[in-house]
Amino acid sequence: MASFTLRINGAARRIETEPDTPLLYILRNDLELNGPKFGCGLAQCGACSVLVDGKEVRSCVTPVSSVQGEVTTLEGLGTLDKLHPLQRAFIEEQACQCGYCSNGMIVAACALLEANRRPSDEEIRKALAGHLCRCASHNRIVRAVQRAAKEMA
């Protein structure tokens, strides 16, 4: 076992774990953050995505020992009283059906909008291409990202 201090959603969190433990396991099991989901375990579906210093990272394959920088989960984007524009847009566009992909879609869209406040439809679709949604909500998800982009611009 090793000791690690991670900055997660603005707070320092000290954990004891094996260095190769996936970040996802720490977030969900130890810190009880339920935004990131376990999907495929192979970094192919995007359900486990988090931001590390504003960049999207697949937490299911990221060893906790490799994490440097601020980790932001879906829970860290906004609050119930003040939702992040993407969270609000997903609600307004009814972009979630089962909700399993929502974490990854919102996290990927957040990374995109931080880098590009006025993305084209093609850029949005490209940024979300690595995220699987079995409910076929893609058009509503793209509309939600467009809505948030207008608000954030």
Image (cartoon, helix red, strand yellow):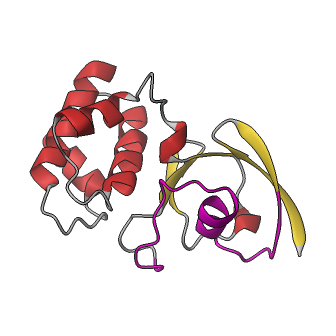
Q: Is residue 23 magenta?
A: yes
Magenta span of residues: 15-42
Residue 147 placement: quadrant: top left
Screen quadrant of the C terminus: top left
Q: Residue at x 31, y 60 (%)?
A: 101
Q: Residue at x 33, y 35 (%)?
A: 86
Residue placed furthest toward the right: 2
| Image location (x, y in percent) of residue 75 | 51, 42
Residue 124: x and y in percent read: 23, 46
Question: x, y (%) of residue 24?
Answer: 58, 66
**Above or below 1: residue 139:** above
Q: Residue at x 72, y 53 (%)?
A: 68
Q: Is residue 66 left or right of residue 151?
A: right
Q: Where 148 falls versus 15 (above or below)?
A: above
Quadrant, the N terminus: bottom right
Q: Main secondary structure of the magenta part?
A: loop
The answer to whether residue 25 is visible is yes
Image quadrant in which you'd find residue 67 = bottom right
Q: Is residue 120 visible?
A: no
User: How far across and how far down the image is residue 120, in percent?
Assistant: 18, 38
Lateral position of residue 102 relative to residue 141, left or right: right
Is 117 one of the magenta-colored residues?
no
Vertical placement of residue 91 versus 126, above or below: above
Taking 63 as reference, is 88 above or below it? above
Name the residue rendered at 78%, 48% in the picture: 13
Image quadrant of residue 148? top left
